[in-house]
Amino acid sequence: MEDLAGKVAFITGGASGIGLGMGKAFLAEGMKVALADWSDEHIAKARAELAGNNAVHFVKANVADRDSLKAAVNEVLDHFGKIHVLCNNAGVNGGGTAASPDFEDWDKAISINLGGVVNGTKIIAPIIRAQGEGGHIVNTSSMAGVVPLPGLAAYSTAKYAVRGFSESLRMQLAPKGIGVSCLFPGATRTAIVPLPEDDPTIDAENAPQFLKDLWDAMRGAIDPEDTGRFVVEAIKENRFYIFTNREFLDEVKQRHREIEEAFPDDEPTPGRVKFESMRAAQVRDLMAPGNRPVPKEDPKAAFRGDRSASPAGGQ
Ligand SMILES: NC(=O)c1ccc[n+]([C@@H]2O[C@H](COP(=O)([O-])OP(=O)(O)OC[C@H]3O[C@@H](n4cnc5c(N)ncnc54)[C@H](O)[C@@H]3O)[C@@H](O)[C@H]2O)c1
């Protein structure tokens, strides 16, 4: 999408941090922005910050709860009429380690950090398709979805999965004229790691040293409004990978070398070569430029899953 002016964005986790940063960057492009969030506190704060701006609509939604998200989407369609850009961005820290016996934390982290992305896509992608005006989906992964964060297995698992989901979605939606990007933030200064100066309930003096070091690092982290501008550029260029933190590059290169070096050097059989050529050709076809426009239909019919309203038969 080259021209964003007048288009509508739906951003989950939109009342704080990176979501709000994307929202501000979209507003600067002349877009209308729906900021969906579960936190009353974050909504109140962001509402005060953006007071008087008619291009913003706040809506309460829990991305892990499909009915809550559908209700929020319905409200935004009533308010703005359309949705062109979806940012599946809501996320939470934590979730526990791989071998811990705790399931509750794990399930919560996966249901928000991965489930929220899946729910948002399955509910809103059909609406964007039905409008027939093109669109773009941005899913927030993390550098923890490329190089794992030690001690945060649930978080890394979800963020790796968001990347896989987005890669697959990209191929599926390219022929429909809808772009997909995956955002991989590194340390970004947001409420996901609360700092003592922002949260008076934190006992900074008695905190463990690793937390003090983390706070120190986060004080010098990326400004989420800069991340928002990276996202705008990627949407305009229809670029899949959005990286914001160059300090990870050497480690990513090393990881890619490790993967390449792990391949055996035997000669593949013709059958194996055929399988891979078929797969690669299919991907090439899906990603070919000049994708056809899709016929228009009532966006709310797609939202209801009413396939009879779709001339394309809901393909
Ligand atoms: N800040 C970083 O350093 C960093 C790094 C990598 C990835 N990320 C990712 O960026 C995304 C945004 O995080 P952030 O850093 O801006 O944090 P943030 O806490 O400032 O913002 C996240 C927002 O998501 C909302 N949210 C949480 N659970 C929700 C739910 N179930 N339904 C709806 N809203 C919900 C929160 O209320 C909050 O307003 C997350 O997916 C996070 O994993 C952040």
Image (cartoon, rainbow, N blue to C red):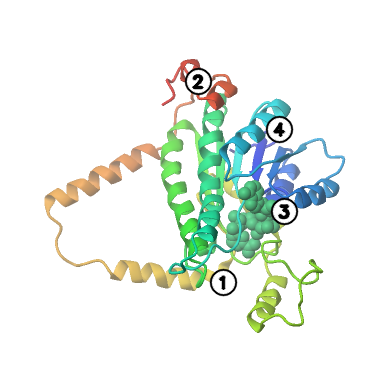
Amino acid type, residue under disc 4 in the picture: Gly
- Residue ID at (78%, 36%): 55
Front position among marks 4 and 3 = 3
Q: Position of residue 314 (x, y in %)?
A: 44, 24
Q: Quadrant of ligand 1?
A: bottom right
The percent position of residue 111, horizontal first and vertical second, equals 53, 50
Give the residue pinned by disc 3: 16
**In the image, is the residue at mark 3 within 8 Å of ligand 1 by its beta carbon?**
yes
Amino acid type at circle 1 is: Glu
Residue 269 image label: none
Q: CA distance from mark 1 to mark 2?
A: 47 Å
Give the CA separation, mark 4 to mark 3. 23 Å
Which label's residue is closer to the chain start, 4 or 3?
Answer: 4
Q: Which mark is residue 306?
A: 2
Q: Give the residue pinned by disc 1.
A: 247
How far apart in space, not on screen, are marks 4 and 2 (Cα)? 27 Å
Residue 192 against residue 275 in the figure, above or below: below
Comparing 231 with 109, the one in front is 109
